[in-house]
Amino acid sequence: MAACTSSVAAILFTSCNPNPKPKFPHHSKPSSYPHLHLRRHNSFPVSATTAATGGALPETEEIDFDREKPREECGVVGILGHPDAAQLCSLALHALQHRGQEGAGIAASDLSSIRSATGLGLVSEVLGQSRSPLSLPGSAAIGHVRYSTAGAASALHNVQPFLASCRFGQLAVAHNGNLVNYPSLRASLEDQGSIFSTTSDTEAILHLIATSKSGPFLSRVAEACSAIRGAYSLLFLTVDKLLAVRDPYGFRPLVLGRLSRDNGAQPAVVFASETCALDLIGAKYEREVEPGEAVIVDARTLEISSACLMPSKPRKACVFELIYFALPQSIVFGRPVHEARHSFGATLAAESPAPGADVVIPVPDSGFFAALGFAKLSGLPFQQGLIRSHYVGRTFIQPSQEIRDLGVKLKLSPVRGILEGKSVVVVDDSIVRGTTSKKIVNLLRDAGAREVHMRIASPPIIGSCYYGVDTARPEELVSNRLDIEGVRKEIGADSLAFLSLDSLKGLLGDEAPTFCDACFTRDYPVHPGELVEAKSKEPLYIN
Ligand code: SF4
């Protein structure tokens, strides 16, 4: 991995010794949940039901069928040097929709001012018609898709990009990641008189830049970055510059590409969380923004310069991007994601085969390539024994366990003709709470499967993430509560095996130490101290 280089002498910081790596203590394993929280709603949306219940509105509960998986909290994109920058941003955000579905927005500069459009919902909902990117003229734009944790969900003021005016002019920011020192940072800024209008950690970065006493913009950003800790891939837009910054550990991905123009004009410069966004708009992948690097692009000349903003640290790229988050067609941290998943599945088959099995099926969509790898190495046929509905996300149902158990059928449908009488290997990317895995096992048995062998193409998740991924609380993680045999019994499979941590590291090769694997090891590269308490107050989720 190349270290970041500097062409902005004033901002160059040299390397220093990394801080000793803190080892985060193991979570205790509670025997039961201290309390359970369900999102309850008394505004049942179907009037016929109101009539059927004599006019009384029944209490309902929100079931989110994707909640079982860890969730990436954001995706970012930036385009500079194209007359349709905002429209291209909007298209690129469609490619990043899997990284956040609760809000989207774009900020664009026409070299004299910045305008923005943000809203709650999918990109197609937010940036259609009334807030069309056509209303955002300019050759430079940044965009953001957002998923928020439960407490801050559905808050329009938290949707990015944030656009602020300060004594230095207008500034917009889009952030993928999570700051572990946000609580104390915010408290200290408020002590100094800052007034926050959101509950997002990203706003603290804007306050730090606005209150900096440094001169040039890049110096102010450098000063702000020296005060924040955690995971951040940031895009800043001023009226005449775009600045891309990645935290010194490089937790979250951020790539740089170029988009050729037909008329012989200079290629546009593109930044994105994943290469799938570059592919969609026809841009070519050039390189990653390196950990600790700031890439500055001038909006008038498209001249690019690079600076090492932060003292170098050992890279700790999120391995879960390869396991689950990123789209399979993306290249993340220099690795094709589909190849990585295929190799995880093949190695899983080598270390934990399922003798006597008839067929391998994936849990769609994320288990697809791992299941292909498993089937290829084991010589078993690969079949799509489960069909996923792409039209179900969250829904409101009555809060009985019986109805809740039926809910999984809205998301996944078994193909009886493939499963009946068979010994089935079902491959998934990960298990978090175990609730969905249990329902999948039941679903396969109900469809006639003779045996169900669950194979997981990652190690057991035993720790929560504090670096921009919404995972469950530690006490909700089934592998933090139970050993593998206990999990097998809980989900009701005939056999269960996970990809071993040693095998995962072996597949990452020499680069293994450059990946964060804290959710499998609790070996946190940046101590999440302040966020542990906040996490412990999040509502527990059952499904
Ligand atoms: Fe990724 Fe897990 Fe590390 Fe979070 S803790 S950054 S999900 S590897």
Image (tube, helix red, strand yellow):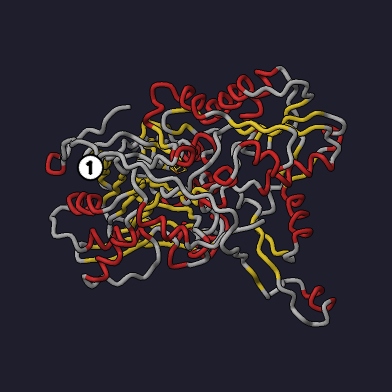
Foreground pick, 242 / 288: 288
Do we see residue 107 in this rendering? yes
The part of the image, by quadrant, that contains residue 303 is top left
Q: Residue at x 23, y 73 (%)?
A: 193
The residue type indicated by label 1 comes to: Met
Q: Position of residue 425 (x, y in %)?
A: 73, 30
**Where on the image, by quarter, is ligand 1?**
top left
Q: Which residue is mark 1?
A: 310
Foreground pick, 420 / 442: 442
- In the rendered view, does 174 fall on the left or right side of 58? left
The quarter in which the C terminus is drawn is: bottom right
Q: Residue at x 26, y 43 (%)?
A: 296
Q: Secondary structure at mark 1?
A: loop
- In the rendered view, does 213 fall on the left or right side of 148? left
- In the rendered view, does 328 fall on the left or right side of 229? right
Q: Residue furthest front?
A: 31
